Image (cartoon, rainbow, N blue to C red):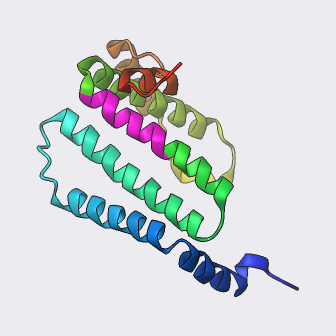
Amino acid sequence: MDNQFLGGAIDQWTAQHRAQNRELIEMCEELNRDSYDLLCGLSVHTGDVRELVASTLFARCLELYQAVLILEYRGMERAAEVELRTLLEAMFSIVATAKSDDMLQRFIDDDKIQRLKTARRIRATTQPEFKHLRDQASDKLISELQKQVDESGAKRLTTEEIARASGFHSW
């Protein structure tokens, strides 16, 4: 049975694709190297929340960029487009949180909402594979997360709001 791209055919296709797009691929790889060098050279002040958020999001952006490249190298254009959208959303978040104290706080507060939501979902699952996670999603943890959400007045932050705040929303 033929394994399609899971077999050896992908190697031949990839070599041909790289040869046909050599200049563009070299430029993408140079950007990756420069970005990685920048990331490794960061000196983040752990007491500065904005620096922590920006550096964490930058690392996430680099990871997503690399995923896009790998998918494109393999000719998986639709999967690369999905990752590219995720990359753009992370980039919007970097810009929005860098520009505005309010957006930085809303981004942090939205994370509290997401953590609470995740803990509740884990707690609700009955699948045996998640028992170790259910044990960690205790009533105490959920109560603490709910308290953080309530005290901060956290409201769900949408991608559209982040895009608007970053200046990348055009309609």
Q: Nearer the viewer, residue 107 or 28?
A: 28
Q: Nearer the viewer, residue 3 or 21?
A: 21
Q: Looking at the picture, how far across and down is residue 36, in whole percent?
A: 28, 62
Which residue is drawn at the image coordinates 37% and 19% (left, top)? Answer: 147
Q: Can residue 106 be seen here? A: yes
Q: Nearer the viewer, residue 1 or 117?
A: 1
Q: Looking at the picture, how far across and down is residue 134, in whole percent?
A: 55, 44
Which residue is drawn at the image coordinates 43% and 21% (left, top)? Answer: 164
The quadrant where residue 38 appears: bottom left
Q: Looking at the picture, how far across and down is residue 61, in whole percent?
A: 39, 50
Which residue is drawn at the image coordinates 16% and 54% (left, top)? Answer: 42
Count of numbered marks: 0
Left or right, 62 with respect to 122, comes to left
Q: Can residue 136 be seen here? A: no
Q: Is residue 24 above or below residue 135?
A: below
Which residue is drawn at the image coordinates 12% and 52% (left, top)? Answer: 43
Any magenta on residue 92?
A: yes
Left or right, 127 with respect to 138, comes to right
Q: Is residue 155 above or below residue 115?
A: above
The secondary structure that dominates the magenta segment is helix
Segment tinted magenta in the rendering: 87-98
Q: Is residue 83 above or below residue 51?
A: below
Q: Looking at the picture, how far across and down is residue 80, in whole percent?
A: 59, 56
Left or right, 115 with respect to 104, comes to right
Any magenta on residue 90?
A: yes
- Quarter of the picture holding the N terminus: bottom right
Left or right, 89 with respect to 103, comes to right
Q: Is residue 78 above or below residue 152?
A: below
